Amino acid sequence: MNRKDFILHLIGELSHFVLDADPTRMVISLHQESTGFHLAIIDDTVRDDLELEGIRAALNKSQRPELAGYYGSMAGYDLLGEARLDLIGWQIKHADVSATGQGTKIDLWLGSDEFDPTNFTITSEDE
Amino acid sequence: MFLYALLSLVLLVGFAAGVLSDGVVALSGAWRLQTHPARLVNDFSQIAGPGAALVNATLVAAIALVLIWRSQISLSGPTIAAFFTVLGFGLFGKTPLNVIPIIVGVAISARVTRHTFGEYILIALFGTALGPLVSAIAVEAGLAGIPAIAAALVGGLAAGFLLPPVAMAMLRLHQGYNLYNIGLTSGFLALFAASALRAAGLTLGPGGEWNASPSPLLVYLIPVLSVLLIASALVLGRGKIFGNLLEITRNSGRLPSDFVSSVSHGGALLNMGIMGIGFWAYVLVIGGDLNGPVLGGILTIVGFASFGKHPRNCWPIVVGVAAATLVFGRSLSDAGPLLALLFGTTLAPLAGEFGWKLGIVAGFIHLVMVLQTGAWHAGITLYNNGFAGGLTAALLVAIIEWRRTNQKKTEGFRSNRT
């Protein structure tokens, strides 16, 4: 799968998750570099600590190559049931989940070993 | 390591039981099975004896376990399901010789697309459903010697190579509501393979052998396994496993639902043991034959009880298949309906996600389909129920999706959203 298709599937599954909560605002931001990319999604759904921890756990799954390479291909395609963040979690390097006060921000980091996530953060203007 | 030890113990006990029951005949019989056509439904316990069938099955499953270990993939729900599926089908179709070309074909596919074999290991292990394609080309194509071996090898490698792309496309078709996705995949590929073989002038007629009086070795295999699994669950989980089992039954079971990693080892093992003994008791009560194919069905259920199946999402499918069987005037203990009932639980996620009524409907449709689909691919794929289940799931998912999409549109307009 090329990078464009991969990003589209990630955005699809992540948007599915965010839209399940029926927000009035959703912002998707993408920063790309040759070694990796940062995808951020912000909504105005206020979630409690337990919900945030659940999202964090789903997105920071341990490496499961047998699931990522096969079932991970369903990410962004299966829109019938509930969104499943673990389909994303098996495929990405790291995820940050935080409360913005007015909603939730999810940052996904993907890339090679040389990828430096500190170069890619959403600026305060973006938020 | 506990799970590796447990599955190795299952293999050792199975192999020893096979050899001890039939002696040298078990070994020579297992060797004879390697050159059997193996298309559906050929009960190895009838063809070469129960001991030979067990020896063959444990050898195929040993290949699976070694591949999982060598690929450094965690032994968890999906790999346990693959292990027990391979073990079960080793009693009626898979042999070490006919699965290896398929596995190598998938490995080549992984190499070409720059994936590790570990990423495709589930496709490789479940993909051994196409083992009879290799056997049929080698034994039934009218070739002999090296040309027969070469043609079988090429057929197996080509099928294995094509499995990954087709498997991923099929997943999107039923969206994870058919647990045996490789059943749909291999059925789809087998349609082309059977057509090609028929075009080449081969007559792939129906056939097969069925053991109508299984020996006690086969009859008591599942209870022994279930007791072992439940005892292991008690050792691992202590007092928590019943709570864990309850948690498992709340899961829809949609692919991929790994009960081992998402709930607990103990809970998953308890579920496996209960499902095994439950379906074994059902077969006993209706007077079914506990032979190779039926044990294969129960072993597959045991495996998938760590990866999607549990009592709550399986019972509606069972009721649906049983109702269809009776409506069409068949006996519950007939080979076709009995296998459909066991393997039809591939549709359990439909009941888990959309409720028991839809589960019963799915089970009913499944029986209607599965009694026809075997002839389409001439038994070249062993997962005929996975194929029929995939078609049933795709139909129901399409209808549900269409209905929900239109409902949501109406709701959107009512609330004046754009």
Image (tube, coloured by chain):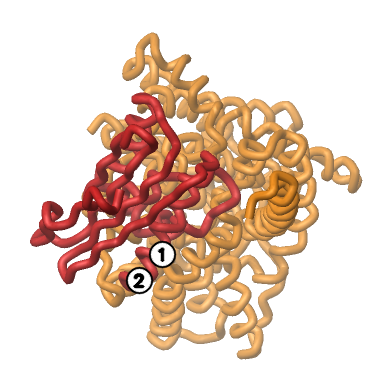
Chain colours: A red, B orange
Real-space CA distance between mark 2 and mark 1, rounded to the nearest whole angstrom: 6 Å
Q: Nearer the viewer, residue A94 or B26?
A: A94
Amino acid bearing label 2: Lys
Q: Specify the farthest residue to the front.
A: A125
Residue B368 is situated, as x and y percent measured from the top left of the image, at 80, 54
Residue A123 is situated, as x and y percent measured from the top left of the image, at 22, 52
Q: Is residue B234 left or right of residue B413?
A: left
Q: Is residue B102 above or below residue B353?
A: below
At numbered mark 1, what does the secondary structure look like: helix, strand or loop? helix
Amino acid bearing label 1: Leu
Q: Is residue A71 left or right of residue B287?
A: left
Name the chain under label 2.
Answer: A
Q: Which residue is mark 2?
A: A4
Residue occupying image coordinates x 31% and y 70% = A3
Residue occupying image coordinates x 48% and y 77% = B138
At numbered mark 2, what does the secondary structure look like: helix, strand or loop? helix
Verify CB contact (< 8 Å) between mark 2 and mark 1: yes
Q: Nearer the viewer, residue B187 or A13?
A: A13
Q: Which residue is mark 1?
A: A8
Q: Is residue B343 above or below residue B227?
A: below
Name the chain under label 1.
Answer: A
Q: Specify the farthest residue to the bottom.
A: B200
Residue B316 is situated, as x and y percent measured from the top left of the image, at 72, 34
Residue occupying image coordinates x 44% and y 56% = A75
